[in-house]
Amino acid sequence: MNHAGGAVRLLAAQAFVFGLSESLLVIASSAIFLAAYGSKWLPITFVAIALFGTLIAAWIARVVRHRPLSYVAILVESVVGVFFFGAWAVLTLWSGVWVSAPLLVLFPILLQVGFVFIGGQAGRLLDVQQIRIQFPRIVSGFAVGFIAGGLVAMPLLRLPGGTNGLFLIAAIAQVAFIMLLTLTAGRFAEWLGQVERAPHGLPRPPLHRLLSSRFVLLLMAYQVLSAAGTYMAEYILFDRAAARFASADSLAQFLSRFTIALNAVSLAFLALLAAPLLRRFGLRLGIVANPAVVLAFTVAMLVSATTAGPESLALFALVASARIADVALTDGVTRASLNSSFQVLPLEDRLAVQSVVEGAGLPLAIGATGVVLFALRTAGASVAVIIAVTVVVCVAWTAAAVLLYRDYARALVVALKHRLLRDAPVDVEHAETAAFLHEMLGSDDERAVRLALDLLPSASEASGEHGELALLADDPRPDVYLPALVRLAETGDVEAEARLRKSVRTLLRDPDSSMRAEALAAIGPADVDLVDEVVTALEVPATMSAAAAALGRLGDAALPRIAAVLAETSEQPTPATVRLVRATRAASPDQAAMCLFPYIEHRDRELGLAVLTALGAAGADPAPIAAALDRTLQADAEHFARCAAVRQVVGAGSELAHALGDELELLRRRVLALLAVRYGAEEIGAVANRLDSDTDDRRSLAAETLDVTLTPADAVFALPLVRTDLPLPSRLELLAAVAPVTPTDRAAVLEDILSDEQAHWRSDWLRACAAYEFGLV
Amino acid sequence: MMLVERVAALHEVDLFSAVPGRMLASVAATAEEVTVEPGSTFIEHGAVEDCLYVVVSGRIRVHHGGQVLAELGAGSSVGELAVLVPGPRSASVTAVDSTLLLRLRKAVLDELLADRPELATEVIRALVQRLRERADAGVDDSAVLE
């Protein structure tokens, strides 16, 4: 999307003030709460977080279905700002430390809600690929804000009453957040200022149905387990910190410094590694890395707790490191990846689902964690036992991550395959429909009769129309009596079948091409003796469409003839041969593969494209032809790099440049056809349609699907060829590692195309254009 | 004209701009070159024909009665609709300067679309685009297309 740069800057600014506000909130509220009540009451706050977090998330999920996102965000953040100001007043005027409890409860809830708002805006202003690359930059604003909060807090904590003042600064940061939300809403009103409606007047599915889909459930499981793992680790950190730092002041100082260190590492990770890692490894890393790393740390913590003891510095260092790694990975790759994964959901329901999954998932997890920790503490469980439970949670989190990534790829394909056109069989049992069809069949209007014959469903269901069909079979017009005979033959009418066979054979010899086309349209799978006539008809423009369709219906019976024609094909096949190959798409997969396999690497790239397309459509097994597919993919990538490089040398405007552009398009179509053989024609067909789409977000979703569907070995060759959303130099750059091109000059290029000594170009048209260009040099 | 020049001339026309050159070469090979002297009318109002003309060089005037509907130069075309669905010409076309044209028959276009059905989408897109551009400009010259 073209406005991405401006949107990212505004969202990063929102994230900064949001991070500042959150940082001040957590430092002040936890310092006051821990000093007043100690860590033993923390699990109770976790339960409160679950209760209030779920209620708030449910309310937001409902409201965003009826109100614009910006409206809801500004309303919620305004209430939060008023609450911060009130907390400052309560603490300053009445020393009401009790207010730290609701504030501590609010922190994780606001954290999630704030990211739902920022992520929701990003989801509407950026496409899926932009989110993957740009979201770490937006989150880096949060990390910077969080560090700034720590830096502001440190000197104030030393002053009497300074801790209370942090809430006043947090309230001012909230005002800045609201102003930025308003500014963003105004600048991008087209995307943020309205409630998304279901397209084409379709009813919106109820929220509970959306939330019960496997993909959304896995997202929920991931969020819940992620929050549980995180809060278990955080509890262990607070517990160990409280044990090491006895006084409230020293504990607050440690928390303040740790917050700065944690966010500094997170910021460095965001600035240096997050985007390159996501670009290189995609969502595979983005979703799985966080739980895997935290799991590794918790296992190390368990070993340390059981060997060196719970009071050891090694355990404390490991707990602190686990928290830092968790936050850095969450901010750097997990948030961006989860935000990207929400993009597969329908736009009109995305934010509501995101509000529930992120807004309620986290509080629920924190509540469950609180209950578990409370039970463990009541039962007198040791630190090692609590760490062991954390390990179990992290194992489940990692498993959920792997399942989620697999389902993401599937969900992307499902989102791409969503079609408005569905099979809609005519219900002949319906009395009014049947009467209407009767009327049409008896009409004097030839078009009405033809339409009725087309609409009649399969033979057994059409038996009620036998009388009309028998009458129509005696009609003198071939385009009426032939379809009627076909219908009657399908019902098992032997006489009609005999008449049909005779009529078709007679009409195929008619000098009028329209009569021959009607006969071809009536050919069925049993007419295997007519293969030669059909193949001949494929060479006549007036009958070629009907002949191609007839060949499709003949299925495997046509393959021996097609194989014979292909065997006689020269290096430059005729258009009729290409048509013949296309007609094999209805053959059985094994037979089609056997017939066409030898021609995958045919010298003529158009014929090769037809072969690959037919193999994909027939659903041929790619395993036995894997080596040929690999060679073809590599050769096409190399030729693509060659054509693109030469096109840059030749320059735009000439017919040669145009021809090279056509060659690039041919190679792109070949690679999509090859991928269809390997990964499924329906899936890749959906991707190809979206890649050709004229909207950035659709192309981006298609590119993302390829990213997660293709094996790395295929992706490295295929993506630069099919990603038309990228400029040509970028595609060449991507190809450079696997298909390097030696720089050359214009004269050498023309010479090479003309001589084609290495048989790279294989195109008379390119040679003609080069010769013409050579004459102009 | 050399084949490459013919293809280049056809590529200038919106209708063929998306057709790969190697396929357009077959079309160009069947095109007839027509030279028209200034003042000569090569399309007569009411005539039923099934061909389109591409202006390679020179200028032409589309007119009906005494009214001039359009003046077109190199890279333009007349009669796109006639080559898809033949019908009586709704205007006459006369050369303003000495004009070189390429004439294409319906049968050739039919064969091209049968070979590459996906090109039909591009042909429809090009025709609609052209009609829309003319409508936006306030010019009602469907006669040019017919």
Image (cartoon, coloured by chain):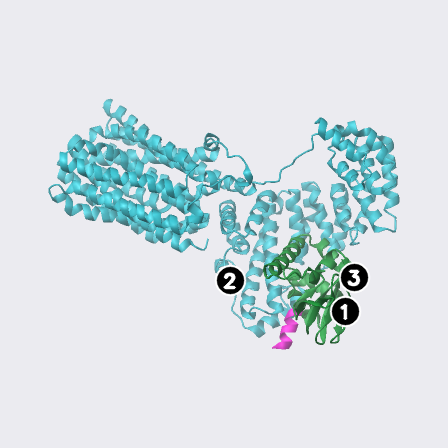
Chain colours: A cyan, B green
- Which subunit holds the residue at mark 1? B
Local crowd size for mark 1, using a 10 Å CA cut-off: few (<14), some (14–19), many (≥20): some
Query: Circle 1 sits on which residue?
Result: B42
Query: Circle 2 sits on which residue?
Result: A740
Horizontal arrangement in the rendering, residue A79 relative to residue A710 (left or right): left
Image coordinates for residue A409, horizontal then vertical, percent: 49, 41
Local crowd size for mark 2, using a 10 Å CA cut-off: few (<14), some (14–19), many (≥20): some
Separation of disc 2 and disc 1 at Cα?
A: 54 Å
Q: Mark 2, mark 1: which one is toward the viewer? A: 1
Q: Nearer the viewer, residue A325 or A740?
A: A325
Q: Which of A588 and B120 is in front in this view?
A: B120
On whether residue A769 falls in the magenta region, the answer is: yes
Image coordinates for residue A649, horizontal then vertical, percent: 54, 70
| Element marked by disc 1 | strand
Relative to B29, does residue B129 appear above or below in the rendering? above
Q: Quadrant of residue A632?
A: bottom right
Horizontal arrangement in the rendering, residue A488 relative to residue A49 (left or right): right
**Residue A496 seen in the current view:** yes
**Residue A303 seen in the current view:** no
Horizontal arrangement in the rendering, residue A412 relative to residue A766 (left or right): left
- Which subunit holds the residue at mark 2? A
Residue type at mark 3 is: Gly
Horizontal arrangement in the rendering, residue B55 relative to residue A396 (left or right): right
On whether residue B54 falls in the magenta region, the answer is: no
| Element marked by disc 3 | loop
Image coordinates for residue A722, horizontal then vertical, percent: 55, 54
- Find residue B46 and name its label: 3
Q: Quadrant of residue A431?
A: top right
Separation of disc 3 and disc 1 at Cα?
A: 12 Å
Residue type at mark 2 is: Pro
Q: What stretch is highlighted in magenta?
A: A768-777
